[in-house]
Image: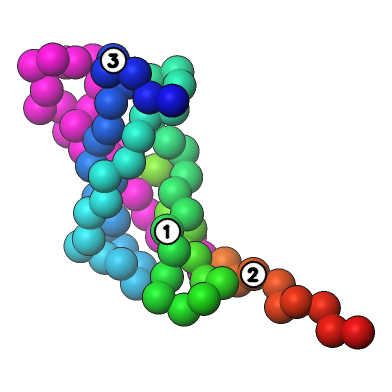
Amino acid sequence: MVTAAQGTYTAKLTDGPLEGKTVTTEFLESGDPRPRLEIPADATGKRYLYARAAGLEFDSTEHPDQPSAVDYRYLEALFDAPPATT
């Protein structure tokens, strides 16, 4: 559960198949940005994995110690294993 002190931030996807897109995501319970994001793709069972990069933006007067935006770099596409057939 997210408290008001934790809130959300904008994840900026800087490269890969979702380059230039942004998504709103929640801080970890510790108040830190998430180290990795798994973003569902249009295809069933496919997700894009992004890792936190160095870019941070601070634009909040309510929580000046937390970033309002964080850069993420593309790592890989993840695929769910197909169901086993018997």
Q: Nearer the viewer, residue 83 or 26?
A: 83
Q: For this view, does 46 lie left or right of residue 20?
A: right
- Residue 58, given in percent of the width and then of the height, sits at 15, 27
Q: Is residue 35 visible?
A: yes
Most distant residue in the bottom direction:
86
Say few, some or many: other residues with alpha carbon within 10 Å of mark 1 (under 14 / 14 to 19 / 20 or more).
some
Q: Disc 2 to disc 1, how far (Cα)?
A: 13 Å
Q: Is residue 71 visible?
A: no
Question: What count of labels does the image hold?
Answer: 3
Residue 83 inside the magenta-drawn segment: no
Q: Splitting the image into 4 quarters, where does residue 41 fall? A: bottom left
Q: Disc 3 to disc 1, how far (Cα)?
A: 24 Å
Q: Which disc, if any, is residue 80? A: 2
- Residue drawn at (37%, 54%) of the image: 73
Residue type of the residue flagged with mark 3:
Ala
First of labels 2, 1 by sequence position:
1
- Residue drawn at (27%, 18%) of the image: 4
Q: Which residue is mark 1?
A: 39
Residue type of the residue flagged with mark 1:
Ile
- Residue drawn at (22%, 54%) of the image: 22
Q: Is residue 48 above or below residue 23?
A: below
- Residue drawn at (26%, 44%) of the image: 24
- Residue 9, given in percent of the width and then of the height, sits at 25, 35
Q: Which residue is mark 3?
A: 5
Dots 2, 1 in contact, CB < 8 A: no
Q: Nearer the viewer, residue 67 or 73?
A: 67
Q: Secondary structure at mark 2?
A: loop
Residue type of the residue flagged with mark 2:
Asp
Which residues fall within the magenta stretch? 54-77
Q: Is residue 12 above or below residue 4?
A: below
Q: Secondary structure at mark 1?
A: strand
